[in-house]
Amino acid sequence: MGFSAILPPMPRYWLYSLALILLAQPALGVVIDDFTEGPVSLTDELGFGSVSDLKLGLDPSHVAAGARYVTFNAIGQPSGGSDTVTVEVDPNGTGSFRQSPAPNLSAANLFVIYGDTSFGLPPMTLDLLANNADRLSIAFNHTIPNADPYADFALGVFLFSDNAGFYTWVRLPSSDGPFVLDIPYDDVLSSSPNLDLSAITKMRFGTSNGTMQGHFEISEVYTSGSPLPGDFNRDGVVDGNDVSSWEQTYGRLVQSPSYFGYLSTDTNRDSSVDGMDFLSWQANVGATQVSASVPEPASLSLALIPLALLYRRPSSRDHLAGDINSWPLRQRRSREGLNAT
């Protein structure tokens, strides 16, 4: 007696739903760095040159090519107190990259570097297009300016392939809560059409002129796909948590016309976080993204064998609303999606 005789008949849409549960996985992006590997603590005193740290042999599913180089030097005006700047990776064991300066100081020539062999790093080939990614994303926990009334946050991002390079300088908001900076690939390629995003050999982010003036913390650098409009915190769900992200960055002007990069809360990419962006949240509240990675045929067959045993052949009256292949992909990051060698 087979399982189909033991269990009651099931409609075909149940079969498809269970198959999707078995086979569904997030559409993986590329983790550049989640800062959970290779802890760093560097402190530089004003006027004492630069400091640096090279980490090798890290897990490449957490750090691009399994290696990272961090360097900076303190600049600013002496305060008469402890004139130091501290830069840390994974300071609390939760994964982050953090700058903590004394008042009126910041870090110049501050860069986190991957793949550049001139710094002792191993070569890399990083596919930023993997799993349908269409943007580079940098998630911040906070950006809190120092006491200087002219304090600013401006982040530089550099990408290189064998035949081209790309650079952008993005002005960031002051925020005591989390937000995400997106750099869409269509903007990258409009500036550097010969850049091969499927074979990035070197990457760095930071500031050469000390323009990250204050305390800031980055939780992750990764690639991602097109999000749901209104999913400001990029968790795949449009809900009340996204309103908090919008409030943190409301009224912020981010981009000048010559550079590229948008806040995740700037849905219409007009370089301003305003009421129009809130309306995109309002129009989509409650929406979620569903992801399904398509497995290899052999894996698909093996996964469906238990279902074939459990359920009867559907009748002609059973139906499925829509083609399973047309269901939307969930473009969310994963800590296990690195494609680097």
Image: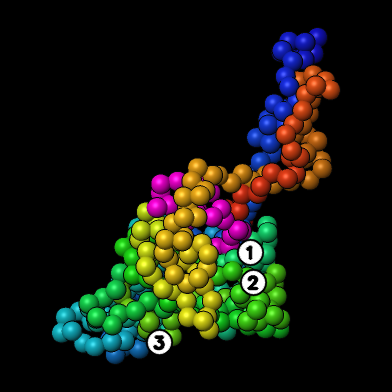
Give the CA distance from mark 2 to mark 3: 27 Å
Task: Determine whether the residue tagged by mark 2 lies in a helix, strand or loop.
Answer: helix
Mark 1, mark 2: which one is toward the viewer?
2
Amino acid carrying mark 1 in the image: Asp
The magenta stretch spans residue 1: no
Pointer 3: what residue? 209
Amino acid carrying mark 3 in the image: Asn
Task: Determine whether the residue tagged by mark 3 lies in a helix, strand or loop.
Answer: loop
Q: Residue drawn at (66%, 41%), measured in percent from left and top?
A: 24
Give the CA distance from mark 1 to mark 3: 29 Å
Give the CA distance from mark 1 to mark 2: 8 Å
Q: Position of residue 251 (x, y in %)?
A: 37, 68
Task: Give the number of the disc on residue 134.
Answer: 1
Mark 2, mark 3: which one is toward the viewer?
2
Q: Are marks 1 and 2 in contact (CB under 8 Å)?
A: yes
The boundaries of the magenta stretch are 222-243
Pointer 2: what residue? 186
